[in-house]
Amino acid sequence: MKVISRRRILQLGAVAMGGALVASRVAQPFNLLPNQTGQALRSVPLLPARQPEPGLVVAELEAIEAVVAVAGVTAKLKTYNKMFPGPLVRVQEGDLLRLRFINRLANIHTNLHFHGLHISPNVDDPFLHGHPGDMAHYEFELPKGSAGTYWYHPHAHGEVAQQLFSGLAGAIVVAGPADELPELKAAEEHLLILKDVTLAGVEVAAHLPFDVAGKEGNLVMVNGALQPVLQAVKGTLRLRFVNTSTARYYNLNLEGHAMHLIATDGGFIETPVALKGLSLAPGERAEVLVQLERPGRFRLLDGANELMTLVAPARPEPTPLPARLVEVEKLDLSQVKTTRQVIFNRAGLGEFRINGQRFDPARTDIQAHLGDLEVWEIKNTLGNEHPFHLHTYPFQVLSRNGIAEPFRAWKDTVNLNGNESVKIVVPFRNFTGRTVFHCHIAEHENSGMMGVLEVVA
Ligand code: C2O
Ligand code: CU
Ligand code: CU
């Protein structure tokens, strides 16, 4: 039985009301491009970077409003470097990334968060608020063993949902030794950034009070386009998915093909896992291999909806899957020092909370010690789904409703369905400082579903 969550019900209500609300703006026409769907998939342009010395990558990002192509039309979005999605930051394990960031948005605070990267909370600081015109310098090293797919987005509390929904998101790809495996090098690689938006005329539809349940856009895009076409050249594809939506979940299937999971949020798993379908909660990433066995056009579906069409080559010759990718560390649970409960609940309709508390940047909710291994039991007492996300410190999921996870993987975001509970194990390594954990439905985080973690020496 498919249960429609409360969030979805509210969303359906929102669509109906939204229709009435935008009716008065119909006079503002879209600037229609020749074809709104079915264009060739655009690959995400690289962020231009300088390498003044080996291992040092220097680049600039600015948050700025710009009129860009989105879903086959043009509209005014909040962007990074006037691009939607934001430019791809491609780096290597061990690189030092030096990023200058300027807030050119009028009247709003913003900052940068490097979602999923194990870097110091003093650099990746979610409490920092950059005023308009401010410049910030972010400099950090990409950890060894971190090869994988990450992303960047704003983290100025209270503004995140609107800013993310309006276009402020980009991907980070960290390359590492495992990418040199011949089976991976033989595959054709594509980054697929998933994002939804609703336009009201040439602007992004504003968040309204009832959107606190989670705003899902009516235009669902891959790399900023509606139902683009990916013409494959090789027989095996490596697809990197990033869910950059504020609230939309994706339940992905590729017609006629199995997807073989090779990486989750925090990088490679040990061996490929054949999936029945791939679900991605807001914030999550996954990498899959797809072997094309025959020519044809195959739809990438989200539930019943077409997201993209994949065109296989005339005579596809799929290359084999790797037998083994990397070793994922087995954490020694006998060393666990502390077990905690993190409870998702709410104070009233639309007032989402953690352990009954509304986010307060001045309060420390959890204090942990550097070097400790902790188990967190995350309990969702609500009937709808919430993705739990922890900054800075990657974790492994141990069990879901008491059932052990089928394989080891590093994660930073894990979904909880209604009334589920999930146990994770987190090693607090390398960095002290204050950071946050929260629900990654950005509207819930906005409403206060976030807590402060401080790691002390
Ligand atoms: Cu994408 Cu606080 O995170
Ligand atoms: Cu994050
Ligand atoms: Cu939530």
Image (cartoon, rainbow, N blue to C red):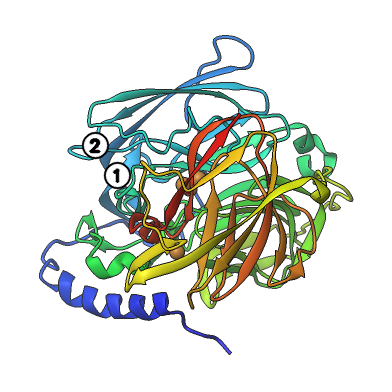
Q: Nearer the viewer, residue 453 or 29?
A: 453
Left or right placement of residue 21 versus residue 114 in this view: left
User: Residue 99 appears at what percent x and percent y?
Assistant: 45, 23
Judge the density around disc 1: few (<14), some (14-19), many (≥20) Cα neighbours within 10 Å: many
What amino acid is labelled 1 in the image? Lys
Check the image and report above or below for 113 versus 251. above
User: Residue 154 appears at what percent x and percent y?
Assistant: 38, 42
Q: Residue at x 32, y 69 (%)?
A: 350
Check the image and report above or below for 331 versus 26. above
**How far apart are the two marked residues, 2 and 1, measured between alpha carbons?**
8 Å
Secondary structure state at the residue bearing disc 2: loop
Q: Residue at x 64, y 44 (%)?
A: 394
- Inspect this view and state whether residue 217 appears: no
Left or right placement of residue 92 versus residue 121 in this view: right
Left or right placement of residue 40 versus residue 7 in this view: right
- Inspect this view and state whether residue 24 appears: yes
Q: Which residue is mark 1?
A: 78
Residue 382 shows which numbered tag?
none
Q: Residue furthest top?
A: 53
Choose the circle earlier in sequence order: 2 or 1.
Answer: 1
Q: Nearer the viewer, residue 18 or 123?
A: 123
**Contact (CB < 8 A) between labels 2 and 1?**
yes
User: Residue 242 appears at what percent x and percent y?
Assistant: 55, 52
Judge the density around disc 2: few (<14), some (14-19), many (≥20) Cα neighbours within 10 Å: some
User: Residue 201 appears at what percent x and percent y?
Assistant: 19, 60
* Quadrant in which the C terminus appears: top right
Q: Residue furthest right?
A: 323
What amino acid is labelled 2 in the image? Leu
Q: Which residue is mark 2?
A: 105
